[in-house]
Amino acid sequence: MADRYLIRTFGCQMNEHDSERIAGLLQSDGMEQTGDADEADVVVLNTCCIRENADNKLYGTLGHLKSLKQRRPHLQIVVAGCLSQKDRALVLERAPHVDVVLGTHNVHRTAELLEQRRRTGAAVVEVLDADEVDDVDLFPSALPVVRERGHAAWVTIQVGCDNTCAFCIVPAVRGPESSRPFADVVDEVRRAAAEGVTEVTLLGQNVNSYGRDLTLALRSGERPDAAHLAGPAWAASVPRVRPLFADLLRAVGSVPGIRRVRYTSPHPKDLRDDTAAAMAQVPSVCEHLHLPLQSGSDRVLAAMHRGYTSARYLERLAAARSTVPDLAVTTDVIVGFPGETAADAECTLEVAAEAQFDAAFTFIFSPRPGTEAADLPATVPHEVSVERLTRLRSVVERSSLRANRARIGLDEEVLVEGRSKRDVDRLTGRTRQNRLVHFPAGTPLRPGTYATVRITDATQTHLSGELVEVLSPPTHRTRIPVAAG
Ligand code: SF4
């Protein structure tokens, strides 16, 4: 019987993307996936250091795995992702039963390092920084992949970040911004479409600055169209131009077979009119913008080094909404940032109310070691932060409910994700605006199916409806029958 692997992923979409690649590599190496740690020969923990208590979660999980390894000594444990990139040697110091420590730029070496560990008997730590690897290794999208959802693909367009947000560890862990070559992104989307993928999500820390570090040579001084940018390299002697994120949206959005293009995340200071124009003009680009606000107070935004004011944020948001019809907007907000006063918290409530978000991820500030904000004196007692968070959530819940109720009576295109975990008699899917929809599973539809659903009810978190018609069946092989929700 083939060896089995289990991957546990913590954190953001970038980590989910890397986990799909690690799965692809292990499967190419002849292994099979299992969901049961007791059956696994290899357990990979793909870690995140952005979320709270990441260390505690990792070392807690490693504690459980230690007893498993005592019972099954051949078990190999891999720690990958941001935390191993940041802490490197510390992982083995605190958990000597770990076999392989892998950095964020070394994903492509997973199978080889496991083999090295088996051969030498010595634990392996391989963590390279961004400037030590070339483009091929920086963008693991080029590796084999086992997709969690066969109809949907994550596509990295950029790694690292050149910003200096005071609360964020990403620049220290993932290094400076580096854009993936334009044609490589488009090629990967074409390959994914050929495998039956119909929805792609372009990933980067600050997608709107995509291309700043790239130039493409042109035959003339004219701005090229997307097809030119995705084409073969031009002679070095001709004028060069920097491709924009909008160019990439147009090129990816016109790949045959791709019905939905999403992206995350843009930075409010870099959101350009041409991005909104591309969203409006390319039919496959979905009407959903995730635009992190973080705070509604200009004083706090300055302390966070966000590079915009609340007025500028609202102005960019209004411009996007006026360009893209029926645009849904979601956001991230942190409350209790060091120095946040009651007046600052009020500003955040006012901006959130004015922005009328469709949904928001809201957090209480917690210091991440290694960031500027971690050294600031904590001035907001936890109970005050909890109260501010509660009030903020009430504001967002009101606008979410209003926006969801406005969908009642509409026929929405829904991409089916599977049966609801909470109610197997219902199917779950997403609209183009990324709203969650539940509807009766009377007609069994496979994940990846597009269907029209008439919306009959709404809460602040989801829509409910009735199937009207099936638009198109999935074109990939189905792997995951149960969806979230
Ligand atoms: S833009 Fe700010 S929050 Fe986003 S990854 Fe860069 S530093 Fe972190």
Image (cartoon, rainbow, N blue to C red):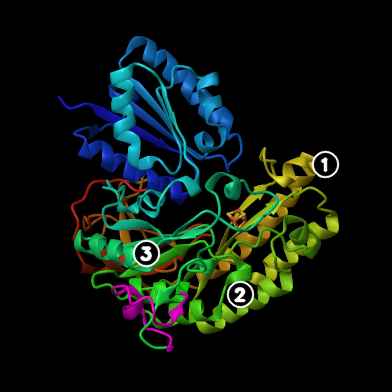
Of badges 1 and 3, the one in the foreground is 1
Q: Nearer the viewer, residue 424 or 477?
A: 477
Sequence-wise, the earlier of marks 1 and 3 is 1
- Write down the residue under mark 2: 317
Secondary structure of residue under mark 2: helix
How many numbered marks, from 0 up? 3
The quadrant of the rendering that contains the N terminus is: top left
Left or right: 121 in relation to 91: left
Residue located at (38% from left, 18% from top): 122
* Residue ranking furthest to the front: 237
Instruction: Classify mark 1: helix, strand or loop.
Output: loop
Question: CA separation, marks 1 and 2?
Answer: 33 Å
Asked if residue 284 is positioned above or below residue 420 in the image, the reply reads below
**What secondary structure prevails in the magenta region?**
loop
Q: Local crowd at mark 1 within 10 Å, few (<14), some, or many (≥20)?
A: few
Image position of 332 (left or right of 10): right
Q: Residue 111 has which mark? A: none
Kindly report which numbered mark, 3 or 2, lies closer to the viewer in this rendering. 2
Pointer 1 residue: 377
Residue 32 position, x and y percent, is 22, 33
Region in magenta = 221-242
Q: Position of residue 25 (x, y in %)?
A: 27, 40
**The residue under label 2 is which amino acid type?**
Leu
Q: Residue 186: x, y in percent?
A: 32, 67
In the rendered view, would you say 296 is above or below 170? below
Q: Amino acid at mark 3?
A: Gly
* N-term-proximal mark, 1 vs 2: 2
Residue 103, given in percent of the width and then of the height, sits at 46, 38
Q: Is residue 28 magenta?
A: no
